Amino acid sequence: MPKTVLIVGTRKGAFLFESNDRRDWTMRGPYCEGWPVYHAIYDPKTGSIYAAAASEWHGSSIWRSGDLGETWEQSSEGLSYGDDDGRKISKVSTLARAGDRLLVGVEAPGIFESRDDGKTWSILSTLSGQHGSEVWDDPANQPPGHLGISGFVTEPDDSENFFTIVQGIGAFETEDGGSSWTPRNRGLRRDWPADWEDVGFCVHKLVRSADPQRMYQQNHVGMHRSDDAGQSWTEITEGLPGDFGFAAAAHPHDRDTFYVIPVDGGHGRTMHEGKATVWRTRDAGSSWQPMREGLPQQDAHLGVLRQGMTIDKQDVPGVYFGTSTGQVFASTDEGDTWSEIASYLPAISSVDVAIVE
Amino acid sequence: MTDVRLPGTLTPLFPGLTRHVEVEAGTVLGAIDQLEERWPGLRDRLVAEGPALRSHIHAYVDGERAGLDTPVADRSRLDVIAAISGG
């Protein structure tokens, strides 16, 4: 019987949750020796789990487990800008599988790849030459908490075409495996002056729907939809309680259904009015419905980070999110109702899901 | 032989590594490189770009604060410390 596995990255290591029915869950962990995990994923190509982690003492490394968490190894071989470059890697922020490439995004902004399933790494791109890259490449210009490369959108069997996000700069697409990049930010809203027309946007989360032409994103200032595979964007914020948030997930079978978790855009960055709510659209953002049943509705000042929500690919997909205060919530009915499956984890940075035999 | 003492956060990362190891080396970096030969990847857990000791890793040779180029002698004691940090 296939089982559902949640891979949860936290400030103090990675945890796994397993279930045969998506209702009763068994937890294992912590893994990765309690290192701060920024993003942990299940790799459908190899069946391995990878965790991008950065220890305050021992630096950044990619942990991997080929047996669903029973054993782990870590490697950072090649994961460096070198002694003479000037840039340093403060953290490894995000992971993705793109065909033969295992990608890791780092801060200071750069993308490294592994062609041997995480044993060794080499620099793929820093997106140098893009408008503004001289600013984000400057070692003195890396703000605190910066993630650098904060996300990817990939297809597991496509090594050449994928998207990446440079935090605070925008989204970029490559069609030649990272050799060249095109900004994909046309139509995005920004509420600040910028030196360039095509960069200077704060893309928090980019997702692809069941239809590759249809993409969504949660931006620093608004939700947006693309109907032309990221070539242009239209804002779809109206009907939501705010324009700011991090987490987002697209329905695996219905291109018009999309989930977001708006949070206060100031210092708090928690859900509005202390009511935990996932917002769902069934019509590509023309209207939004709050999903609250089973979620705490009083004094629940919960935050969810950009990799903190995911959705599985069952016929009736399950939706999952983890909070920065250590709760994991799950829905098995596309968000209509929710249950809390973990309450006391460390601060959660990422949630991924896999269906495994 | 230099008597190397390693932080407890390091040993779980490398099978067979113990907190007390003896190496033959001329400097702190040389001692770390000796460990790297036996446990590949270990250097990167202690040494950052530069090269320089990682921000929260400190080294002491015979009780004195040391850098990567500090000499170590036969029968020196090299303590590698994970600084008190984090939370």
Image (cartoon, rainbow, N blue to C red):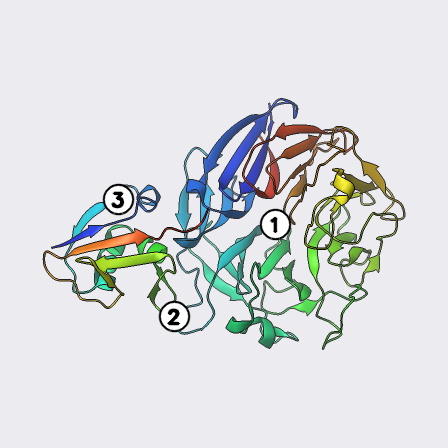
Q: Which residue is mark 1?
A: A157
Q: Residues within 10 Å of mark 1 (few under 14, many from 20)?
A: some
The residue lying at 49 percent from left, 42 percent from top is A12
How many angstroms separate mark 1 from mark 3 (CA)?
38 Å
Point out the frontmost of discs 1 and 3.
Answer: 3
Picture quadrant of residue A33: top left
In the displayed structure, does residue A252 sit left or right of residue B34?
right
Q: Are marks 2 and 1 in contact (CB under 8 Å)?
A: no
Q: Which residue is mark 3?
A: B17
The residue lying at 18 percent from left, 66 percent from top is B71
**Label 1 is found on which chain of the structure?**
A
User: Earlier along the polypeptide chain: callout 2 or callout 1?
Assistant: 2
Position of residue B25 measured from the top left corner of the image (x, y, whole percent): 16, 61
Q: Residues within 10 Å of mark 2 (few under 14, many from 20)?
A: few
Q: Can residue A176 be seen from the camera position used here? A: yes
Q: Are marks 3 and 2 in contact (CB under 8 Å)?
A: no
Between residues A147 and A110, which one lies in front from this camera angle? A147
Q: Which residue is mark 2?
A: A83
Amino acid residing under circle 3 = Leu
How many angstroms separate mark 3 from mark 2 (CA)?
27 Å
Vertical relation: A310 (above or below) A266: above
Between residues A292 and A112, which one lies in front from this camera angle? A292
Secondary structure beneath label 2: loop
Secondary structure beneath label 1: loop
How many angstroms separate mark 2 from mark 1 (CA)?
34 Å
Amino acid residing under circle 2 = Asp
Picture quadrant of residue A78: bottom left
Position of residue A111 measured from the top left corner of the image (x, y, whole percent): 54, 62
Amino acid residing under circle 1 = Asp
Q: Are marks 1 and 3 in contact (CB under 8 Å)?
A: no
Between residues A288 and A72, which one lies in front from this camera angle? A288
